[in-house]
Amino acid sequence: MKLSQLTKDWEPMSYGFLDASAKREMRRKMLKAVAVPGCQMPYASREVPMARGWGTGGLQVSLTLVNPTTRLKVIDQGADDSVNAASIRRFIERVSGVSTSMDTLQADLIQSRHRIPEEILREDQILVLQVPNPEPLRSVQPNMSIARQMHADADYGRMWLQLYEQIVRSGRVMQGASYPSLVNGRHVMTPSPIPRWDVPKLHMAKHLTILSAGREKRIHAVPPYTRVEPLVFDDVPYKVEDHASLICSRSGAKGFFMNEIPQDDGTSDYELSDSEYGAKTIRANEGEPVTFGETWYKDGEMTS
C-alpha cells in the first residue's frame, strides 16, 4: 500500500456523518451487545439531523456499519416509501454514497421500524431495528435503577405476574407489539414494537439483529443462531396475529402479515404489510421474471 492511498482531500464532513470517535464507541458497544445477547448496553447517543423518536438509534448504527460497498434497504412498518423510511434512506445516501435497494434479497444492511421483512434473511445480512423503549420492565418497575438490578439478578417475576394478570382478566395475553422475549435463556428483552407475527423470526435466525434506542441511549443485539423465546406459560401457547386466512387485495398473496385498509362502505380490505414483497408478487402475476427468497411463513404457519 502506498502512502498516497491513506490520504485524501479535506472534506467538510466525515464519511457517514458520524465522527471517528463516535463510530468507535458504537462498534465497541455493538460488540459487547453481541457478546451478551439481549443485554442492554449504554452508549453516548449523538445528535443527528433528525428528531429523537424518529429512528436516531437505528440511524446511528447504520451510519457506523455502512461502507462504500454496502447496499442499504430502509423500511417503516413494512413500507419502503413511507416518510420515515424515505427520509432516512436519502440521508444515508447523501452522507455516505451507498447504493440502496428495495429488494430484501439484494440488501446487505436493512434498517427497519416495527417490521421484519417476510423473506428470510441470510447470514451475510444485518438487520437494524429502531427501538423507542428498550426496557421491557418499565411497565412493572418504573425505577430504572431497580429495573437494572432485576436484570442483573434475572428477576423477572413481575413480568410473569403481569402476563398472568392479563390472562385472568381477559382470558388471554393482551401484550401485542414489543412482546417480552427471553434471549439465550438469560436476558429478557423487548424486540422493538414489531408485531407478535415477527417475534418468532428472531429465534435461531441466520442474521445478526441490532436493536438501538437513540433517545434512551441503549443498544442490544441478537447474534445469529441465538434462542429467542417469547415469555409464555406451558398451558397458554404463544399465538401470532390471525392473518393466515387474509388475502392481499392488490397482489392476491395469502398467509402473510397484512395491513387493514378501511373502506367507505364500512368493510375492510387487506394489503401485504411488506410492500416490496407485495410489489414483487404483482410483477410476477404480470409475467415479469422475479426472484423470490424463502419466506418465514408458509400459509400462515412458521417454516421450520
Image (spheres, helix red, strand yellow):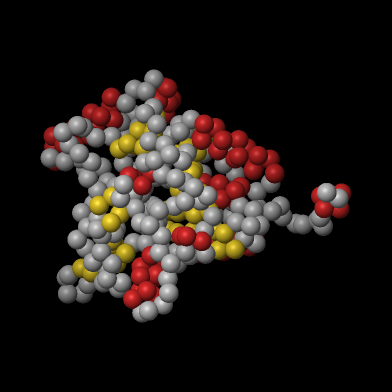
Q: Position of residue 262 (x, y in %)?
A: 23, 68
Instruction: Tell me how many marks there are.
Output: 0
Q: Position of residue 82 (x, y in %)?
A: 43, 65
Determine the residue positioned at 62% across, 60% down.
98
Q: Is residue 292 visible?
A: yes
Could you say which is closer to the camera, residue 199 or residue 168? 199
Q: Position of residue 160 (x, y in %)?
A: 25, 29
Q: Is residue 55 visible?
A: no
Could you say which is closer to the camera, residue 124 or residue 164? 124
Quadrant of residue 225 in the image?
Answer: top left
Q: Is residue 270 above or below residue 172?
A: below
Q: Is residue 91 above or below residue 18?
A: below
Find the residue positioned furthest to the right.
3
8 left or right, relative to 193: right
Determine the residue positioned at 20% across, 54% down.
242
Find the residue positioned furthest to the bottom.
286
Could you say which is closer to the camera, residue 57 or residue 154? 154
304 left or right, relative to 113: left
Q: Position of residue 204 (x, y in %)?
A: 39, 40
Find the residue positioned furthest to the top.
153
Determine the residue positioned at 24% across, 32% down.
162
Q: Is residue 113 above or below residue 254?
A: above
Q: Is residue 303 above or below residue 44?
A: below
Determine the residue positioned at 32% across, 36% down.
229
